[in-house]
Image (cartoon, grey):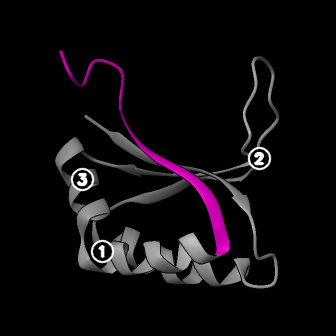
Amino acid sequence: MSCYVIYHYNIIDKKRIDELGPLSLPIVKKFGGELVIASSITLLEGHSPYGGMVAYKFNSIEIAKNFYESVESRELSKLRNEITEGFTILVPEYGALK
């Protein structure tokens, strides 16, 4: 079942934000993933200090973890942490953990 790696973030270096997309997509594709969300968010309920979201979909939890833990992804995380602040979550598709 599918699994998502989701980044919630605020941009702290607007001059460099356009660096991330072109560097991340080849890594995502290497693991068979796809970009499904890349935009600012509209909060409908509750509160969040973060205004942006990027979500990648992978075919399984294992593949999503392998993507996130890969050398390429870890290197990109260093750059992402210079340009954005936020957090990353792994979300399995409903029913994947049954």
Residue 75, above or below 87: below
Q: Nearer the viewer, mark 2 or mark 1?
A: 2
Describe residue 32's horizontal placement relative to residue 76 as left or right. left
User: Which residue shows up at 45% across the image and 72% down it?
Assistant: 77
Q: Position of residue 52 (x, y in %)?
A: 72, 51
For label 3, the residue is 65
Whether label 2 touches label 3, CB < 8 Å: no
Which amino acid type is marked by label 3?
A: Lys
**What range of the chain is rendered magenta?**
83-98
Q: Is residue 64 left or right of residue 26?
A: left
The residue indicated by pointer 1 is 30
Distance of label 3 from label 1 (alpha carbons):
13 Å
SS for callout 1: helix
Q: Amino acid at mark 1?
A: Lys
Local crowd at mark 2 within 10 Å, few (<14), some, or many (≥20)? some
Q: Which residue is mark 2?
A: 51
